[in-house]
Amino acid sequence: MKNLKFHCFYNSINLLHIFPQKKYYRFQFSMADEEKKFESVVFKPIGYASTWFKFKNATPRQPSVSALTRGSIKISTEVFSQPQHSLKNLAEFSHVWIIFLFHKNGRPFTKTMVAPPRLGGARVGLFSTRSPHRPNPIGLTLAKLEKVEGDTIHLCGLDLLDGTPIIDIKPYITSYDYPQDMKETDSAESHLDSAESHLDSTGSHLDSSSVPPTMISNPEWITLGGSEKTLNVAFTQDALSQIRQFSPEAEDPAYRLSFLKSPEEAQKAIEDILREDPRSIYRKMKGQDLLYFCVVDCMHVTTWFDEVIKKCEVLRVMPYSARQAMIEANKKQQWDNNLAKIEDKMKVM
């Protein structure tokens, strides 16, 4: 089990480096000369996310991108001797907050100004964004709880890479998590007392009439472009035929879906992910004419994007395992070709 260990030094909080050492992640910070003492806080992951997102490519930036992005979290026995007890009663809630670690950042520093993908290169302050590159690389996401089985929770609407270390899980409670007007704090407390009577069978949905009204505001650039930023997603007839070969009951393991429940869900998941244009700013500017590849469940998806008509077309869908075999075969062929060239030069000499 990996321990999440923070070496925090006060005053100047500048991230120097992030690196795995032995079986924990270490975060080391600088401190002012006059400060001689420091504190260490250890967070041990309670488990790790299991999702189909093996790579950053096409991993949703937000959980709302698709409700079909399923996954699970298994509570570790290194945290609890009987982890199933920690999940008792959680199934009564419909949604949960997940606190996790951005363990694949790959960057030893953070910037004060960042460029969110939807702004096309414009920069804003780091803390006004949800960039994963933060002084303390901790993330928060909201997921729908499908079921609890023993020591494992099954979720949908996930935006986590496979293997993401999970720091904590908390239930979403409408009467607490819904923003309330601070001027109406007293009346809000009285509403909270009666909130339970308005919860549905999941224990989560609260009648809006019981929640004090409040003004929620966001800057215009958060929704800049709105639906204009989304793309039209089309499928070639070949791609549609290929998708229909995938199912949870497929005889060939290469075509057997692990997270999605039908070919129709597979097509919808692909469409949801591509509609939001998962490409990076760099890829949009420097690689417009290149094919784009992503993995959805056990499917390797080949697409192309047309910037002019805001369209993404799915060209081919094949088993990810078959694609990996092709890549390995190509590497071997290239190696053999290079080796043959070297041998020919040696013969000439």
Image (cartoon, helix red, strand yellow):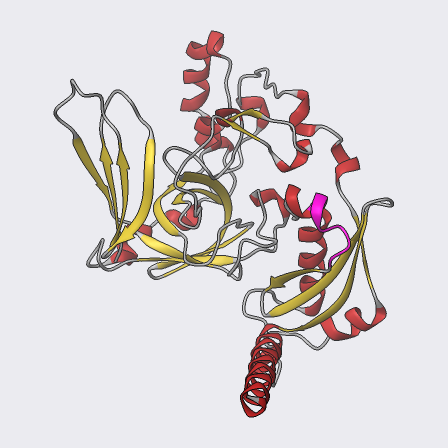
Report the side of 315 relative to 117 (left or right).
right
User: Which residue occupies 51% across, 22% down?
Assistant: 179
Report the side of 203 relative to 10 (left or right).
right
Q: Residue furthest bottom?
A: 347
Locate residue 289: give its quadrant. Answer: bottom right
User: Which residue occupies 64% across, 68% down?
Assistant: 300
Locate residue 114: give its quadrant. Answer: top right
Q: How many marks?
A: 0
Up/down of 57 relative to 218, above or below: below
Is 178 part of what is drawn in magenta? no
Which quarter of the figure is the C terminus placed in? Answer: bottom right
Q: Residue furthest left?
A: 36
Q: Position of residue 246 (x, y in %)?
A: 66, 74
Q: Position of residue 265 (x, y in %)?
A: 67, 62
Question: Which is nearer the eye, 333 or 22?
Answer: 333
Magenta range is 284-290
Question: Which is nearer the eye, 142 or 310?
Answer: 310
Answer whether residue 277 is visible to the viewer in this image: no
Q: Position of residue 192 (x, y in %)?
A: 43, 23
User: Which residue occupies 45% across, 16% down?
Assistant: 188
Which quarter of the figure is the N terminus placed in? Answer: bottom left
User: Which residue occupies 19% across, 59% down?
Assistant: 81
Is 289 part of what is drawn in magenta? yes
Report the side of 229 relative to 117 (left or right).
right
Up/down of 196 relative to 98, above or below: above
Q: Position of residue 41 (x, y in %)?
A: 21, 37
Up/down of 181 relative to 298, above or below: above
Q: Residue furthest front?
A: 349
Q: Residue furthest right?
A: 309
